[in-house]
Amino acid sequence: MKSYAAVIWVGATWSLGLVACSPAEKSVQVKDVGKTTTTAPVSSVPGQGETEGATTVKVVAAERYALTGEIVSVDLAKKVLVVFHDEIKGYMPAITMEFLVSSGDAAGAKPGQKIRAEMIPSKDGDFRLEKIWPNDTATTSAVAAGAMQLRQDTFTRGKNAYREVGEAIPDFALFDQEGRVVQSGRFRGKMVLMNFIFTRCPVVTMCPASTTKMIAAQKMAAEAEAKEIEFVSITLEPAYDTPGVLKEYAVARGIDTENFSLLTGPEAAVRDLLTQFGVIAELKGDLLQHTLTTLLIGPDGKIVHRADGSAWEPKEFVARMRK
């Protein structure tokens, strides 16, 4: 496995610049009020004594507050959630108020849903929610239990954690783009085409190309009348790719989510899955270095075929789905 992984690393790894994840933007937690201050570089025009044409960098602080609460109503057109939130100690009492959200978060929100998120106040008096996650006991307990089981399984397997072709995939529980819990057992009895991407990948020959091929395979499978097929993309960047972000990604790319799930969840669970599926993803400074892997999983939960890198063809996998 060691020599095989080295081949993948050299042949399929790219350095991907994450503009929104530079060292200057890393968070510092202020414990007494649950506040996170994120600093981001902003370009400005040259000041007095500066060289013409040069760019200076100013640091602008964006305050973020951890928030938990329950959605009261959703205005999809305005991308506004009305949320009754718990007290934010040292900043705000428990209160019902409006929050601006992304189109993906608005589309996936439902009245009565309990959430945790980060609240960002603006100078204009508006408040925005980002990094919205389901927070009801049932879903969080299911995902936490899945992560714990997966951690134990990865630890127990040790150096044999990597799953070869012919082996069964590990059990897992993650959130899909709707914020629903998806357990691996749901796919038993079906063929599954699985890959690993992240939504901010800027290299067209990497994650964007992989997603395009997954969409093409989904259409080919439908045209070939291949039955009981599921498509799954697991994020490489769960800290950023929340259910709402994945929802927006799916809508922007016209993904038919009838049998195509985009999954995210605890970082530890995703790391264990990457280990067991032989996918390399390491954040080094501002760069996420990763490999590409596409897997075909049989109805019995065993890996039928895999392709490492970006040079796989949808028709090859669809042909195997029909066998």
Image (cartoon, rainbow, N blue to C red):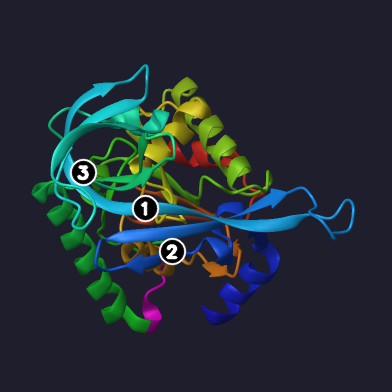
Label 2 crowd bin: few (<14), some (14–19), many (20+), radius 10 Å: some
Q: Are marks 2 and 1 in contact (CB under 8 Å)?
A: yes
On the image, numbered disc 1 is attached to which residue? 64
Q: Label 1, secondary structure: give it.
A: strand
Task: Please state which amino acid type lies under the numbered disc 3.
Answer: Ile
Of labels 2 and 3, earlier in sequence is 2
Furthest toward the front, the residue is: 48
Q: Which of 243 and 253 lies nearest the eye of the viewer? A: 243
Q: Residue furthest top?
A: 77
Q: Is residue 106 left or right of residue 2?
A: left
Say if 2 sits above or below 7 in the image: below
Magenta-tinted stretch = 159-165
Residue beneath the point at 51% across and 28% down: 252
Magenta span: predominant SS is loop
Name the residue beneath numbered marker 3. Answer: 115
Mark 2 to mark 3 CA distance (whole Å):
21 Å
Badge 1 density bin: few <14, some 14–19, many ≥20, Cα 10 Å: many
Label 2 – label 1 distance at C-alpha? 9 Å
Numbered tag placed on residue 27 in the rendering: 2
Instruction: Work out whether residue 92 or residue 35 is closer to the camera in this orientation and state it.
Output: 92
| In-front residue for pair 240/145 | 240
Numbered disc 2: secondary structure: loop
